Amino acid sequence: MGTEQTFAILKPGVLQRRLAGEILTRLEKKGFNIIALKLASLSREIVEEHYAEHKGKDFYEPLLKYMMSSPVILMILERENAIKALRKLAGPTAVDDADPGTIRGDFGVITRRNLIHASDSPESARREMKLFFSDDEIHPFLDGNARWY
Ligand code: CMP
């Protein structure tokens, strides 16, 4: 598996709970290159498009409200096997199933307000990156530490 890109959202609880630095540190330490990063206050339109697959589920409306409630951090991350590696670092969706050591396991309290979204497949990653970032906002770089991993 070669270098791969994935997309992540640090949800409203992250900035509110002052967890941004800690989570970014975990990502960097695990070898992810942060190749795009910005804050955004999400519109209903873009959140609906992002979470279209969940439309009609009981948690859909609360999820939209949560995602629009306060600014989020949007990111594109690059690494070997990035999609799987990030989902593993994030932990499972249900916070009570998430082991200590994962982001959801260490900081999540309520599943509906879990702290991170991570793309679940190469197709989702491509779609989500395109939805939130333009090409000129993405800055891949050579990881000088890669030979030490
Ligand atoms: P995320 O990875 O962003 O993708 C969809 C989100 O919906 C998920 O994280 C949770 O925040 C929320 N979600 C998914 N499944 C459930 C569920 N069973 N109950 C409540 N919220 C859920």
Image (cartoon, rainbow, N blue to C red):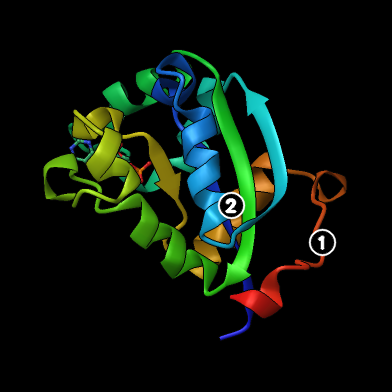
Which numbered dot is residue 28? 2
Measure the C-alpha gap from mark 2 to mark 1.
13 Å
Q: Is residue 20 above or below residue 53?
A: above
Q: Residues within 10 Å of mark 2 (few under 14, many from 20)?
A: few
Residue farthest toward the left in the current orientation of the protein: 96
Marks 2, 1: nearer the viewer = 2
- Kindly identify the amino acid type of the residue bearing the numbered disc 2: Glu
Q: Is residue 117 above or below residue 41?
A: below
Q: Earlier in the sequence, mark 2 or mark 1?
A: 2
Q: Nearer the viewer, residue 92 or 143?
A: 143
In the displayed structure image, the side of residue 93 where residue 43 appears, left or right: right
Q: Position of residue 144 (x, y in %)?
A: 78, 68
Residue at position x 58%, y 52% in the image: 28
Q: Nearer the viewer, residue 32 or 8?
A: 32
Residue at position x 37%, y 18% in the image: 65
Q: Which residue is mark 1?
A: 141
Q: Position of residue 98 (x, y in %)?
A: 19, 49
Can you tell me whether the CB of the residue at mark 2 lies under 8 Å from the nearest atom of ligand 1?
no
User: Count of labels shown?
Assistant: 2
The quadrant the C terminus occupies is bottom right
Can you tell me whether the CB of the residue at mark 1 lies under 8 Å from the nearest atom of ligand 1?
no
On the image, which quarter does residue 125 sit in? bottom right
Q: Is residue 16 above or below residue 148?
A: above
The quadrant the N terminus occupies is bottom right
SS at circle 1: loop
Q: Position of residue 81 (x, y in %)?
A: 52, 74
Q: Quadrant of ligand 1?
A: top left
Q: Position of residue 63 (x, y in %)?
A: 32, 28
